[in-house]
Amino acid sequence: MTLYNILSKVPRVAGDLASECSAGVPACIQKGNPLLWKNLLFISVKDLVARKGRLLLTMMGITVGVTCLLFLLSLTTAIKKKVLTEVLGTIPETELDVMPLEVEWGAIRFQKADTPTLDDEEIERIKKSIPGIKKLYGIESLDIPAEIEGTFKVEVPLLKKDVPIRGFATDCGVSGIPRELFLDALKRPEEYVFMGEKGPVPIVLSSHLVEMYNMHFAKAMGMPKVSGTWIKQQEFDLTIGESGVIETRGARMVMGPFKCKVVGVSRRAPIWSISVPPPYVGYWRKLYYGEEKERTYQKVVIYAESVNLVENMEAKLKKMGFEVVTNQETISKINTASTIINALVVVLGLIILLISAASIINILTMSVYEEATDIAILRAVGARKSHVRGIYLLKAGFIGLLGALDGLVIGLIAIGITNNLAEKYLQNLPYRPDTFFLPSVSLAVGCFLVGLVFSLVAGVIPANIAASLNPSKVLREG
Amino acid sequence: MRAYLVEPMIQIRSLTKTFTKNGEKLVVLDHIDLDIATGEFVMLLGESGSGKTTLLNILGSIDTADSGEVLIEGFGDILSASDKRLSEYRNRVVGHIFQTFNLKKIYTAYANVKVPLLFGTVSVRDAHDRIMRALERVGLAGREQFRPPELSEGQCQRVAIARAIVNEPPLLLADEPTGNLDPKTARRIMELLVSLNQDDGVTLLMVTHDVSMLEYAKKTVSLEGGRVTVREK
């Protein structure tokens, strides 16, 4: 078939075109091209793939940026979750810790003179004047020196018994803390009750203390490290009225030793005290002083009926002269710190992405000038300015797509490797989380979109330069 | 004589184009008037810088003029048309052939010829048929998968001609199409262009410096000092 035959089937001259078109516009011109974007994509991808080295170089910036964003944000998300759920999560948002106001004088803290003492009378006053209290617990502190003494034992399966390896003795405080505050830490809450003279005294230790012991004391003193599970059910001797650091010869009496049994480890337990059911404090004081003494509390824990009341209650308690710490305040502080860290991470990632965007602008603009003749030919054969712009935006989009996908894959691999290494080598890290990274789908999608958007935005400048090239000038100048 | 030969396909009226170089205004086309009939083979002659390529580029709507009219029958004045309509005009009505071929080196002959179809409305199957027919018409059947560096200069120009005719335009604009070719290859290319004009009825405007090419055209248009002189055999 000759071209004449081909041409005879279609409008060959403008006059013929006019006869079948309205307003002199050829029929084919009036139709749209449903494949146009596919065709533009064909041109873009073909051009990019033809220069694989340059494509990789251009993608690299976006890849690095997305990898950094995903890696660092996953890390900060995990840290934030650890702090909020595991460290503070045990303390409800409706909780207010009320303490007598103190003043600091160097390293020494004094109760402020005009601050009311937290006794039963004062607690009644609080209950009456502060509406919205759901529950209230007083935390008593034993005002007598105490010493805990014991022996570390290791189970030897061959001998089918525990073998003592090292003894220890240390001063400690004794706090009377109600069971309700330890419900999350007690496997068998019924164990944490006043046993009277029978014993053993059920005690709860601070998990911070266990962590600190493992990290510092055990290492420095050649003592064995202990786990939270192991330490439960361990037994120690508690002697009241005796101290290794304070001269207690003038003390009224030495009581004990009382057999103690660890029934739980809690983050809520005071770090330098052993926690016992509150009746023990009154019992030992009566034994020591020989008479009932007025109960004073180190701290009162108040639960509000709702979170909304906390702020108002806090203000009223402060007005009454107490120091008040709320979990909301702490959470808010942690959230602020976390937001600042996240913002810094995001800024770092964005700086990397900005640099890569600048590199995309540079490389794509360079290729616009290199491909100027090709662009002019495209215009000469019917491409509109918007088509040329589209081709370069698609190129930028393609770079962003591949770069961001690469970034996600590399980021996830880096997270996996780092997490494994951290789990292996940071086993003794205090507050060690179950996982050091928390990459979520939404985080991955967010990082991917940020990479893609940066690349697309970077493509706007070269795309506009390409679209504004004068084809006649380009072809004339070669 | 065929009926369409009497109709002027292109009517140029008072076309003016000036360039400014080093602050000096240079009039390359000075109120020129020219009619070109459908199916004509017109040679554009003139010294370098006389405005031949500029005129061709204006006719191909890849350059603009300062004033005047370029009326294409059935389309209207291309100087006042919108970017959208002009792109459709370039895609459907005109085919460009250049001295330096301007092929994309990374594309095969097939892909180079396909480029104008990417902006048209031809279906994928029709596009394939058209590309194969165009390559066959220029004598390159079987060379579809060759890239420009693997082809001779003559073959490259044939690919460029196939690209120009693949959308079956009624008007071909050739800017020194034989300028980079040896005499033998140039002659073959000219035979192909004459065949397109005579056998297929394509209107052909060709810029040349080579007076030996004048034998192929029945009409010559000389440009000098911004004015045109028309000679017909």
Image: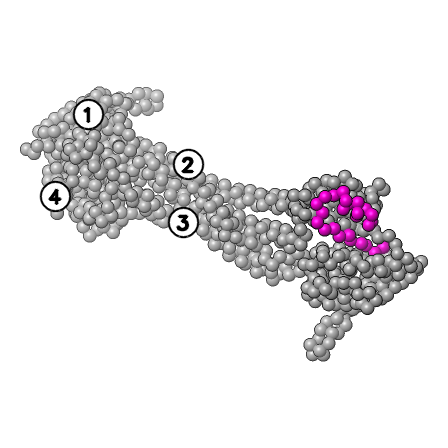
Disc 2: which residue: A461
Which of the two labelled residues, at mark 4 and mark 3, occupies the earlier sequence position? 4
Judge depth for marks 1 and 4 and give the one in front: 4
Q: Residue furthest right?
A: A250
CA gap between label 3 and label 1 equals: 49 Å
Q: Is residue A249 visible?
A: yes
Label 1, label 4: how far apart the Cα atoms are: 30 Å
Q: Position of residue A84 (x, y in %)?
A: 63, 51
Q: Residue at x 77, y 44 (%)?
A: A128
Identify the residue at horizontal 74%, vertical 61% (top origin).
A204
Pick the front one: B197 or A416: A416
- Considering the image in quadrants, where does the C terminus of chain A appear? top left
The stretch in magenta equals A119-143
- How many C-alpha atoms fall within 10 Å of the one at disc 2: few (<14), some, or many (≥20)? some
- Percent x, y of residue A335: 62, 45
Crowding near pointer 1: few (<14 within 10 Å), some, many (20+)?
some
The residue tagged 3 is: A53
Label 4 to label 2: alpha-carbon separation? 46 Å
Marks 2 and 1: in contact by CB < 8 Å?
no
Q: Which residue is mark 1?
A: B12
- The three-letter amino acid code for the residue at tag 4 is Asn
Q: Is residue A425 left or right of residue B176?
A: right
Tag 2, which chain? A
Q: Amino acid at mark 3?
A: Gly
Q: Nearer the viewer, mark 3 or mark 1?
A: 1
Residue A182, placed above or below residue A13: below
Give the structural element (helix, strand or loop) at label 3. helix
Dividing the picture into quadrants, the one containing residue A196 is: bottom right
Q: Which quadrant of the structure image shows residue B213?
A: top left
Q: CA distance from mark 4 to mark 3?
A: 46 Å
Mark 4, residue position: A5
Q: Amino acid at mark 1?
A: Ile
